[in-house]
Image (cartoon, rainbow, N blue to C red):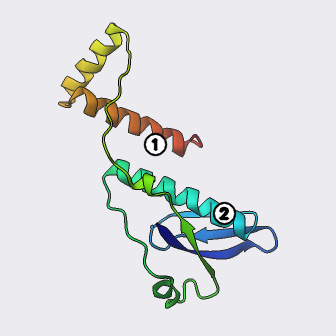
């Protein structure tokens, strides 16, 4: 899938800012135009991953011409950022993990208290931890 991106100089001669109009708040910066396009693809994948984790819909890309009609991006260079279709995959996979019995009991107690299944509780806690790490500058 390819999302239209608007590329504009952020600091003349040094960095370029990329905005993804179809994904509110999705942007990136690159040292050059090519670097900015690569950074945009990574930013789009992170945006989609977060939206899926939060249960939000993923907007489909609209044609560049629809975005060029407004004044917001009148001076922008337009390109298409390629996004790996796998980031849109939300298929459930069965995994086998090993936990000490005492930890598993505590997981089950926490899940029961939260009125969730073990899998649902583990999923929620994992997504929350990943989101916190991302906001703190982590992966």
Q: Is residue 98 above or below residue 128?
A: above
Q: Is residue 1 left or right of residue 5?
A: left
**Label 1 to label 2: alpha-carbon separation:** 21 Å
Image check: 130 left or right of 10?
Answer: left
Find numbered disc 2 in the image and state the secondary structure of the residue it sits on.
strand
In the rendered picture of this protein, how many numbered marks are placed on residues? Answer: 2
Residue at 44% from the left image edge and 53% from the top image edge: 87
Residue 45 horizontal/vertical position (percent): 50, 55
Residue visible at 37% across and 9% down? 100
Q: Position of residue 132 (x, y in %)?
A: 48, 40
Q: Residues within 10 Å of mark 1 (few under 14, many from 20)?
A: some
Which of the 4 image quarters holds residue 129? Answer: top left
Return the residue at label 2.
29
**Residue at (20, 25) in percent of width and height:** 113
Q: Looking at the picture, does residue 89 appear above or below residue 60?
A: above
Residue at the disc numbered 1: 131
For label 2, the crowd category at 10 Å Cα-Cα, with few meaning under 14, some 14 to 19 and many 20 or more, is: many
- Compared with 120, 41 (above or below) is below
Q: Residue 14: horizontal and vertical position, in percent?
A: 80, 67
Q: Nearer the viewer, residue 62 or 50?
A: 62
Q: Can you give x and y, in whole percent of width and height, for residue 13 in the image?
A: 82, 72
């Amino acid at each position: 899938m390819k999302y239209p991106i608007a590329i504009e100089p952020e600091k003349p001669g040094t960095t370029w800012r990329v905005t993804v109009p179809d994904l509110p708040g999705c942007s990136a910066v690159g040292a050059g135009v090519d670097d900015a396009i690569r950074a945009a693809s990574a930013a789009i994948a992170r945006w989609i991953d977060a939206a899926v984790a939060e249960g939000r819909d993923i907007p489909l890309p609209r044609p560049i011409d629809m975005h060029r009609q407004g004044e917001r991006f009148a001076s922008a260079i337009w390109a298409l950022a390629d996004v790996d279709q796998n980031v849109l995959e939300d298929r459930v996979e069965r995994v086998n993990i090993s936990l000490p019995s005492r930890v598993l009991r505590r997981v089950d107690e926490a899940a029961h208290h939260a009125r969730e299944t073990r899998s649902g509780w583990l999923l929620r806690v994992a997504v929350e931890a990943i989101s916190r790490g991302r906001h703190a500058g982590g992966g």
